[in-house]
Image: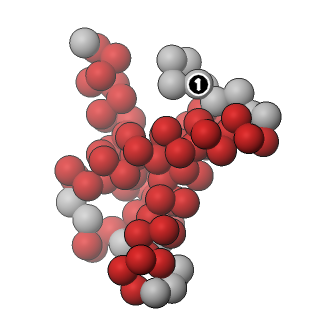
C-alpha cells in the first residue's frame, strides 16, 4: 500500500517537472501530472531496457528517476505532436 502512495507522489513530481520542461504546466493539473509521471515511468523503463540502463519500478534509484523523467517528457512530446502537430 505504501508503495502505491510513493508511486503517486513521485509520479506527480516527475509529471510536474516534465510539464515544466515541455512548457505545458499551465494546462495540466495535479491529476494529469500524476498520470503523466506514472505512465512516463513505464515508458522510461521501456526506453531504459532498450539502451541498457537498469531502471526498475521496484527500486528507488537516480537512474530510475531520470528514466522516468525522460519517459514523461517523451509522453508529453507525443501528446504535443498529436494535439498541435508539432513538438515544442
- On the rendered image, what quadrant is the N terminus found in? top left
Q: Residue at x 34, y 17 (%)?
A: 3
Q: Residue at x 38, y 36 (%)?
A: 10
Q: Residue at x 29, y 22 (%)?
A: 4
Q: Quadrant of residue 48?
A: top right
Instruction: Report the residue that reaches farthest toward the right.
Output: 52
Q: Secondary structure at mark 1?
A: loop
Q: Residue at x 28, y 14 (%)?
A: 2
For this rendering, which residue is in front, 43 or 25?
43
The location of residue 63, given as percent across then percent down, is 66, 34
- Left of 8 or right of it: where is 53? right
- Local packing at callout 1 (Cα closer than 10 Å; few below 14, some 14-19, many 20+) is many
Give the residue number, with chain letter if any, for mark 1.
56
Q: How many marks?
A: 1
- Left of 13 or right of it: where is 66? right
- The relative height of residue 58 versus residue 68 in the rendered view (above or below) is above
Instruction: Report the residue that reaches farthest toward the top.
Output: 1
For this rendering, which residue is in front, 21 or 32?
32
The location of residue 78, given as percent across then percent down, is 48, 68
Amino acid at each position: 500500500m505504501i508503495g502505491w502512495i510513493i508511486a503517486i507522489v513521485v509520479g506527480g513530481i516527475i509529471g510536474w517537472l516534465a510539464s515544466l520542461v515541455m512548457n505545458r504546466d499551465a494546462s495540466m493539473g495535479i491529476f494529469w501530472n500524476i498520470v503523466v509521471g506514472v505512465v512516463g515511468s513505464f515508458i522510461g523503463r521501456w526506453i531504459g531496457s532498450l539502451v541498457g540502463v537498469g531502471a526498475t519500478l521496484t527500486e528507488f534509484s537516480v537512474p530510475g528517476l531520470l528514466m522516468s523523467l525522460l519517459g514523461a517528457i517523451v509522453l508529453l512530446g507525443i501528446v504535443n505532436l498529436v494535439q498541435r502537430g508539432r513538438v515544442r
